[in-house]
Amino acid sequence: MLDLVAVREKMTVADALAISLKTAQHAETLAFKRYWLAEHHNMPGIASSATAVLVGYIAGGTQRIRVGSGGIMLPNHAPLVVAEAFGTLAELYPNRIDLGLGRAPGTDQITMRALRRDRVETEADFPRDVADLQQLLAAPRAGQAVVAMPGAGTNVPIWLLGSSLFSARLAAERGLPYAFASHFAPRLLHQAITLYRSLFRPSGSLSQPYVMIGVPLIAAPTDGEAEFLASSTYQRVLGILRGDRRRFPQPVEGFMEHLSQEERAAIGDFLAAGVIGGPDTIHRGLTELLRTTAADELMLVCDIYDPALRLRSLDIVAEACAA
């Protein structure tokens, strides 16, 4: 599961953090494999900016589930700082920490400049920073001048994330697992994973391609109720498209009916990989995604305004997957 730590209307940031922990604990009881947190900045409806801190919070409140970043936006950070943070997490929670890396800013241009100050990114920076981070988390070489402490020798698993072909190619060249951000940018999904698999080179950490895809998911007892609950996500997506970001809204009956055809189409394109419905619809949708992508893992993004109904949604998914 991927959590953006949504700050809901009429609730606080503290509420959002508590809801995320309770959701992770529930996902663990359902045998979910991973719980990742996304890095975003300057967004009133998302409280996941201090991603490494949240990874520690969730890992500390769970027992077995892997916890990680989906992802750390590497251009915002020095590789040494990331290595030390995730190295510390790996020492605190052995064999439970993942480090997903992205190259987008995770924010707007003004905030990006505030994060990076005077640094101007080039296309060569991300591959070089990934290589530096790999070395900082590996056993130190003889004479290595800068050693991450903690971090060195922890070999925290690195994933490359992306919504374009750039990271697919880089993940293949480096022999790293690849996660495609189809939960918000599904257009290049099939092209990216085909490219990744065709160019993949085995590495010391991975012998064959390994693909994860993001899936927006809302499950309820009926298709109609699921559509109603999904209207919160529809409102958020429309706000993103309009440049009007707010706190995660309450669901609205018949929300899509009041939109223009162009707005409905834009939301549909954004959520094209989504699976929304009752148990049978969920089972069919996830089965079809696995058939068409042969993904090794599905990373679910399940945002529902009512926290209890979010947990119920995960129950329905678990039952559908077990069927």
Image (cartoon, rainbow, N blue to C red):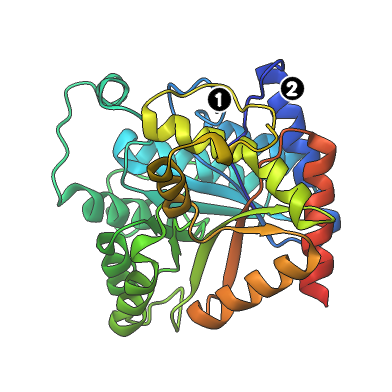
Q: Residue at image x 65%, y 77%?
A: 287
Front-most of 129 and 242?
242
Numbered mark located on residue 15 in the image: 2
Label tally: 2
Front-most of 6 and 246?
246
**Res. 321 in view:** yes
Indicate the position of residue 2 as horizontal and vertical percent values: 60, 49
Amino acid found under the numbered disc labelled 2: Asp
Q: Quadrant of the C terminus?
A: bottom right
Q: Secondary structure at mark 1?
A: loop
Task: In the rendered view, tell whether residue 317 sits above or below residue 115.
Answer: below
Place residue 21 in its image quadrant: top right
Amino acid found under the numbered disc labelled 1: Gly
Q: Residue at image x 29%, y 57%?
A: 131
Front-most of 228 and 198?
228
Name which of mark 2 and mark 1 comes first in the sequence: 2
Place residue 260 in its image quadrant: top left
On the image, numbered disc 1 is attached to which residue? 45
